[in-house]
Image (cartoon, rainbow, N blue to C red):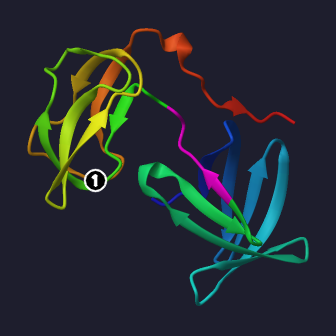
Amino acid sequence: ILSPVANIDLIFNNTKFITKVIYTGPNSVVLESNNSKQSINIRTLADGGFLLDINGKNHLVYSTNESGGSIRMILDGHTCIFTPEYDPTKLRSSVAGKLARLLVPDGSHVITGDPFVEIEVMKMYMPLKALEPGTVHFQMSEGATLSPGDIIATVLLDDPDKVVQAEIFTQ
């Protein structure tokens, strides 16, 4: 069953905006964030953009999903890039390809920048590197097909307190 409500966390410049989008009609939503609500009428444009009507003012928006889970949004000519939450405990593929080989055994200790796997993308091989020091545990085996965002391995961090998380916007 499709839900009329979508919870979306948008992170911009290390600040997390917790939002809820409530679908109220085929071309309208209510956006909730920080104890405020805003009704938005949306018109899809032929070029893939959207025309938003917010309180009688029109805004032009273009949005694309980038590799690695980022969202590039152009709002009235201004570009914003919303990034996914920084989580070094999950080592993800940023591209589609094949897991060519594991460069360290399961349960090995890696340090920041250590290559842990090699992936094949369009007949080229590239290493993926650890984001933080810790013990790596593989979730996929050699030869697995990868899509962007797939979790290849998890890492038990040496010092989880060193990882800076995005701060929730509270104003």
Q: On the rendered structure, is 170 left or right of 12?
A: right
Where are the magenta residues, as a range? 80-86
Residue that appears at 18% across and 40% down:
118
Q: On the rendered structure, is 113 left or right of 107?
A: right
Q: On the rendered structure, is 110 left or right of 3?
A: left
Residue 103 among magenta residues = no
Dot 1 crowding, Cα within 10 Å, few <14, some 14–19, many 20+: some
Q: Amino acid at mark 1?
A: Ser
Q: On the rendered structure, is 60 left or right of 100?
A: right
- Quarter holding the N terminus? bottom left
**Image location (x, y in percent) of residue 163:** 54, 20
Query: Is residue 4 at all visible to an observer of this figure?
Result: no
Query: Is residue 50 at all visible to an observer of this figure?
Result: yes
Camera-side residue of 115 and 9: 115
Residue that appears at 85% across and 48% down:
36
Residue that appears at 16% across and 20% down:
106
Is 50 placed above or below 32 here?
A: below
Is 158 placed above or below 119 here?
A: above
Q: Within the image, what quadrant is residue 42 found in? A: bottom right
Residue 85 among magenta residues = yes
**Image location (x, y in percent) of residue 149:** 36, 47
Kindly give the residue lying farthest to the left in the view shown. Answer: 143
Kindly give the residue lying farthest to the bottom in the view shown. Answer: 46
Q: Secondary structure at mark 1?
A: loop
Tag count: 1
Q: Within the image, what quadrant is residue 115 found in? A: top left
**Image location (x, y in percent) of residue 107:** 19, 15
Camera-side residue of 168 and 110: 110
Q: Which residue has dot 1 on it?
A: 147
Camera-side residue of 133 and 71: 133
- Quarter holding the C terminus? top right
**Image location (x, y in percent) of residue 133:** 38, 16
